[in-house]
Image (cartoon, rainbow, N blue to C red):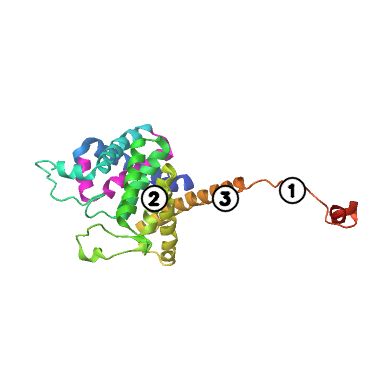
Amino acid sequence: WTDGFWMRYFLSGDIWAKEAAERLTSYIMTRFLKGGEDFMRSLWSGGERSLGWPIVAAMGTFESTGDEKLLKMIKKVVDFIDQFTSDPDREIEEEKGTAKNPIIWWRTALEDGCKPFMLGVIMEGLERYHRETGDPAAARSILNLARFLIDVMWLPHQATFIYEWNAFGRGHRMSRPHSLIPLFVRGIGYAYEISGEKIFMEVSEKAFHSCLWTLYNPESGGKSIGMIGRTLGAYVTMAEGWIKRDYEEYVDSLQESQGKDFIWSYEKDGGIKKLLE
């Protein structure tokens, strides 16, 4: 992530934090521009978050500097994700990797081994990129990922999600952790923002309320706590906007009273007595 470096720089003026963010971003750009599509496929096939983190990190620097070159690099990653999530079965059946790096088994988004919290990393990166560019490829990917989460991973009676789809590890097969919901509910919420499909709002709100009890004792580790604070806060901001909008629409829907004013007092100008005569 670069967000922490940039926050430190803006809050304290620490030039070393700024340099660290810039160097980290430069390293990420170099790796992705040199590696090309084969490099991205290799990362993606082993865990989808491996493409999510670079987008999040690069967007942190873009939001801080406005460097347009970063958007061009991110666009390459976004287009790859869009292509894969549009038809993941086709991508896996047709893709064998390279002679040097053959793909033997995919453990990735929308396929066996898919984990919601990893999709959350991708969706945050895609959201931040989409907010800046409006790129339809990013929007399509977000909606495809959100629909998979609801259609395949959502457990309505427990108000949570399967930890891993077709889990290879036995310990994962019956894991239904509410504690991981804060890491990806934001993505489902943003799917509602860009589509207006009520199912995204309804499921995300139910999931949000079902996970709140876990915040009394959050998992240890800076990564989990950092993601919870950032992603859940962003979701709450969106949800508050929906509540405000719905209330305003309710008020606007009320019919204006057509009744005539009258005076309740018996003494003043005849009051109600005069109306009854």
Q: Residue 116 at x, y = what percent?
A: 31, 54
Q: Are marks 1 and 2 in contact (CB under 8 Å)?
A: no
Dot 1 or dot 2, earlier in sequence: 2
Query: Mark 1 — residue?
Result: 259
Quarter of the rendering occupied by the C terminus:
bottom right
Q: Quick check: 164 above or below 197?
A: below
Seen in the image, is 85 located left or right of residue 60? left
User: Residue at coordinates 41% horizontally, 51% vertically from top-left?
Assistant: 199
Could you say whether the residue bearing mark 2 is in a helix, strand or loop? Answer: helix
- The numbered dot on residue 247 is 3
Dot 2 or dot 3, earlier in sequence: 2
Residue 22 visible to the viewer: no
Disc 1 to disc 2, how far (Cα)? 45 Å
Dot 1 or dot 3, earlier in sequence: 3
Q: Which residues are magenta?
A: 39-67
Q: Main secondary structure of the magenta part?
A: helix
The nearer-to-camera label among 1 and 2 is 1
Q: Is residue 62 magenta?
A: yes
Q: Residue 58 at x, y = what percent?
A: 35, 41
Query: Mark 2 — residue?
Result: 188
Disc 2 to disc 3, how far (Cα)? 22 Å
